[in-house]
Image: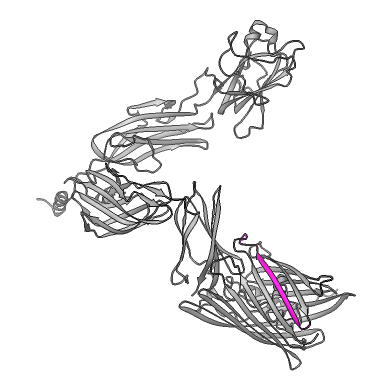
Amino acid sequence: MPPAVPAPWSWRIRLLFGWLLVWASAAHAAFEVTGGGARSTGLGGAFGAGADALDAVWTNPAANARGGRWQGGTTHVLLYPGVAGSPSLNALSLVAPVGGGGLIAGFSALGADDWDEQVGLVGYGRALHPRVAVGGDVRTGAWRTEGWSHRAWSADLGAVYEVGWVHTRHFLRLGLVMRDLVRTSQAAGGQSAARAPRALVLGASLNGEAQQVLVDLEHRAGRLQLRVGYESLLPNTAGMRLRFGGSAFASDWQGGELSAGVGHRWREWSFDLSYTYPLGPDGAFGGVHRLSLGYRRGP
Amino acid sequence: MIKHGAWLVLLGCWALPCGAELKTSTLVDANGFAQAVPEGVELRAGGLLTLAPLPEGINLALGRTALDEYGKKVPLTDGNVLAGGSEWISGTPNVFGRTFTVDLGMDRAINRVRLLPGGTAQVQPEYFVRGYRLEVSSERQPEIWLRLAEQRANFQMTVDTSQDTTWSTFDAAGNPVPRVGRYVRLTIIREDRSNWVSLGDIEVYGTGYSSEGRLSGVLEFAGPVNIGRLLWQGEALEGTQVRLWTRGREGQQDGAWQEASAALFAGAEPQGGLDYQVELTTADPLITPGLSQLSVEWDPVLVARRSWGSVQPDTARKGEYTTLTYRVDLELESGDYGVDYLQLGATIGVEAVLFNGVPVEHQWRADESEGRTRIELGQALRESGVLEVTGRALVLQDRTVILSSVGSRVQESAAGYVNWQNAAEAPGATWTVRGLGAPPRLISAVEISPRPFSPFRDGQVEFGFVVGNLQQETEISVEVFSLSGAKVRRLSQVGGARAYSLAWDGRDQDGRIAAPGLYLYEIRVDAEDDAASRTGTLVVAY
């Protein structure tokens, strides 16, 4: 029997993974909380394979590549309201059909007593094949405090693969995102200690008639994080949806969190609420509240 | 011809006390112990002081508590076995399985147990125990009973395990091997159909060492001296302890013994003599601690002839910083070293130091963990006068005693350490500050500085806070989290009620410098009867 010949692309995949895994650095504190909406956070942040959704502006630049309709919305976040000097965050998200693809834009501003940070992104996604769509975005983040300020640039790449109907009632979609490709330093002095770590996200979403299950696996700074979300349409509630989610690191429970949320859609308008509870601090800080309001032209 | 070096020595002797050197008095060593009274200890060949062996024939159960299986006290350890005296009598022939437990108070190496008949059994021998089981359990594992002896058919009027071949273990020479235990249990395992049972006493005998012993003595000096380090060498295995207590022979206002937990003598100085007491204890009857040497260093040259400390005001609101003035009255003579250092037994933020009303150049350092403030004067004080220190202090307790000591650079350079000369409380005044008001909150006065914090510019950020109303030492922790709730670093310290300052160097648990950003922190105190936490944010920027 002749020896197996490796597929010609296999070494490229290995090289890509190796390149992504080599760069481990400290946790990125600035820009850690951005404008992701209440729907995706209610699902534990597992939205790497989310598609045709306003929340996906912040999670996968290819997710809205075949949307074909205008969407816009705002998100308002209250982080740990019981903590003295806790910050709040406000965000805008936009999806526009342009040139057969989807143009995405987002802006979020986080503010505390003496700390401000802003993140803006612009991206574009386009379907290359009935099953495959790709996209990319450029994002800029700036922070400012007393006597210090800094702006950093970065870029993300994303892809979505529509696996299709894996069962008569269940549709499977996969997503791949490479985030923070540029790894610029977040430090005003350019210290290498503050380089944002790259991240690789593999996502999957299984959609049923009234239910959806999402799973993300993210590798960042040498740590593997699993995120899981579940959404269900509540019967006899005129379209109310209930969501649960959670995340955990493979090595320990530090940094894990639990989420819950509700959402409702009325004609072109959507209204979502979520609550996220971090497991690390043993309840000392409380949780994070998110409220999102969205508009979507068309059905 | 006098060489230059000798001139320098003569010049030094004119300017500074000369001929001064630290003396050492040895109290216990291989040659014995000086003027000391042993009690429960013995000095072995080679100079090792140990606990004395337990005297033979001592009934360890005498006066201890004996209970039946219902927890009711029974008169089986009072030593009274005379006819007509105290006894336990069953009142029924149904005695099978009845138990009696004697608590010896601590683990003992038991090698013999005796059961004596009560007065009724002495008159009617058929009323004595027909069958018995004797067991022992230790303080550490009281639920595990080990058999000492068991006799199913007893016809002796007095049970004596030294005559009983059923003792559990014997050595090669045929002697009973002692069992270590605190609780001795008697179980009646045979009953007579028609007779009650009458018991007089349970006696327990042991071997090994006495549980405690002490050596007390006196050290007289030729004149008033500044007592230095108390040095001792010994061996204390797990479960044993060697403790040293001292008391000055004069000027000790309450005459109380003080445990010499630190190396330096803690009482007021100078002293003309010293009472000392070495205490040896063991929780294991087969192990003894040992003390091989005990000596005292002392300096015939004083820092000052006398010093007295007092504080004003003598009251303060609990949990609030209060400005205090600490006064040290100094009496110096020409032969004294002079005062270069002042140490106060409280943490005080020093604002001014005056000598006879004139400001004195100084440097100070407060040690929160030790609860002390050390002040170094720019120039030595060589004349009598009043040294006053003004500063802010935090009072948390009902009573805060602020002791004081004076020290000398000359003495320090000669001996290699500062032999603090402890002050006495000033007559007619007090060095105790009474705390007024309600107990302070468990955590208060939280200050995080600097903000923003740069690990590269500032080095570290200080978490300052006050822990009050804490009755005993516990773990005090500060945890730093990222905004997403991931733990970045944990800092902790064990301590009591006082001001704390925990420093974070900006590194995470893996030693990497944390990225710029907004972080969360939690300060936590977990006391046995109370818990509290304070949360907030801090900024890292660089």
Outermost residue toward the right in this view: A168
Of residues B104 and B238, which is closer to you in this image? Answer: B104
Snapshot quadrant of residue A200: bottom right
| Image quadrant containing the N terminus of chain A | bottom right
Residue B150 seen by the camera = yes
Which percent across, then down, holds residue A266? 78, 80
Of residues A51 and A165, which is closer to you in this image? Answer: A51
| Image quadrant containing the C terminus of chain A | bottom right
- The reply, left or right, for residue B347 in relation to residue A167 is left
Outermost residue toward the top in this view: B123
| Residue shown at 17% from the left, 45% from the top | B333
- Is B263 drawn above or below residue A65 in the view shown? above
Per the rendered image, the range of residues in magenta is A267-283
Snapshot quadrant of residue B120: top right
Which percent across, then down, holds residue B425? 30, 43
Number of callouts in the render? 0
Outermost residue toward the bottom in this view: A99
Q: Is residue B530 magenta?
A: no
- The reply, left or right, for residue B148 in relation to residue A204 is left
Of residues B496 and A296, which is closer to you in this image? Answer: A296
Of residues B479 and B416, which is closer to you in this image? Answer: B479
Outermost residue toward the front in this view: B437
Which percent across, then down, holds residue B426? 27, 43
| Residue shown at 64% from the left, 7% from the top | B122
Q: Is residue A272 magenta?
A: yes
